Amino acid sequence: MHDRTPDLLPGQRVRPGDTGPEADAAATPSGTVSRRRLLGTAGATGLVLGAGGVAAGYTAGRATAPESTPVTPLTALGTNRAKFHVKHQPGILQPAQAHGHLAAFDLAPGAGRREAVALLRRWSTAAERLMAGEPAPHEDTAVSRDAGPSGLTVTFGFGHGFFSRTGLEKQRPVALDPLPEFSSDRLEKDRSDGDLWVQIGADDGPVAFHALRALQKEAGAAARLRWHMSGFNRSPGAAARPVTARNLMGQVDGTNNPKPSDPDFDQRVFVPADGEPAWMAHGSYAVVRRIRMLLDDWEGLPLGDQEAVIGRRKSDGAPLSGGSETTEMDLEKLTASGKPVVPMNAHARITRPDQNGGAAMLRRSFSYHDGFTDDGAPDAGLLFVSWQADPLRGFVPVQRKLDRGDALSAFIRHEASGLFAVPGGAARGEYVGQALLEG
């Protein structure tokens, strides 16, 4: 056994007259043995090696009941709390958190509308409690017992197959029709689609995992996990000032995201109160894509070539036409040789709303890293999540344009896809999707 001077607990002090290991630790230099401990252990090798007698009794009587220490309050990060009962479900308007989980479930064989109602009730109750920093309703695992809410959000959506499984085909939105095929897709069926979709985000990893595990357990026999993906973003406070996030290619990503202050923001992102179907009022449609980045190829490009692919400077996200990150891109500006400063196939040029009939979407994504392939290449990229009032007017036009000639396409691979109808937030006393399932 190693005999070392015990450390003081944080905030613990030794007062005159104290005895025991704490006093020794405070009174002796690091790495030395106090006179009291020397006398207590000299010639007592048998006691120490025997792990019993006085030594064991002292530890049990003294160290397990230390003097009370000051309780360290939660930081601002831990106390951040998102509300569950809101107009739009949580997890759409909040900035993307540092830790995220995306998961899809399929209703179990034989499960139908009644089982779906009970499941959404359980999930909504659990989400409300967890977002408040409270334990899960049943068999809480205590993973996040010491943490606050940490900005946890839980979002629920319905996939195309959910409606036939529950006998609600007539309530299925036209906007939920399957996405068209794109030439760059390399989709894996077992990691795409699903009857039910769950998005979890939090600024603390154990809090996010705790929510994922709780919801999986609450699914019980009603639904089975179809796929799961975990991701991350920069932690709050990691940068000296608020900045647009960077993706794993090192590029500033999200500069032209629509902002809630934009006059047409709600029109682009959310289904109106009088929209169709009625149960989707204040809801949105989530397009989910697992986009692998071919980082070995990308990182082999010279900086100038990387910037030409994107159409923006890597250092600060400013357009190649000049200015700062938020400067309007000048698509007409030419080089001395007469070529566009922003190449015609640059990603930032192609995705602009004015190049796609005004199509726009709110991107709220996570990066991911799932290890390395057999050849050593990183299996990493973007868990792309976009929000729009209608994917046929938001996501689809832009992706079709990218599919026809985006310079970035050579360095990415779309490997999974899903489209989900995300209803508006649940009113107090209701559960998510109640207007659909009981309307």
Image (cartoon, rainbow, N blue to C red):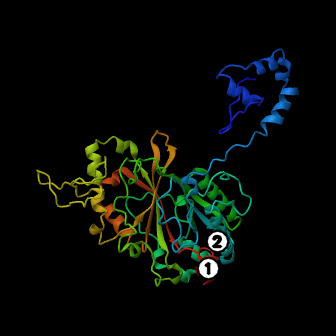
Residue 120: image tag: 2
Say what secondary structure mark 2 lies in. Answer: helix
Q: Please, what is the three-letter code of the amino acid marked with disc 2? A: Leu
Task: Measuring from the top left, give residue 320's x and y in whole percent.
Answer: 23, 53
Q: Quadrant of the C terminus?
A: bottom right
The quarter of the image holding the N terminus is top right
x, y percent for residue 115: 69, 73
Q: CA distance from mark 1 to mark 2?
A: 9 Å
| Callout 1 secondary element | helix
302 sits left or right of 170 in the view = left
Mark 1 and 2 residues: CB-CB less than 8 Å, in contact? yes
In depth, the one of 67 and 213 nearer the eye is 67
Residue 263: percent from left, percent from top: 35, 74
In which quadrant of the rendered view does residue 119 lie?
bottom right
Q: Reply above or below: 313 against 391.
A: above
Neighbor class of circle 2 (other Cα within 10 Å; few <14, some 14-19, many 20+) is many
Q: Quadrant of residue 11?
A: top right
Q: Is residue 291 left or right of residue 141?
A: left
Q: Nearer the viewer, residue 27 or 414?
A: 27
Check the image and report above or below for 64 versus 370.
above
Callout count: 2
Give the residue number, with chain letter if any, for mark 1.
437
Q: What label sits on residue 11 in the rendered view?
A: none
- Amino acid beneath label 1: Leu
Mark 1 vs mark 2: which is more N-terminal?
Answer: 2
- Pick whichever, 264 or 421, lies toward us: 264
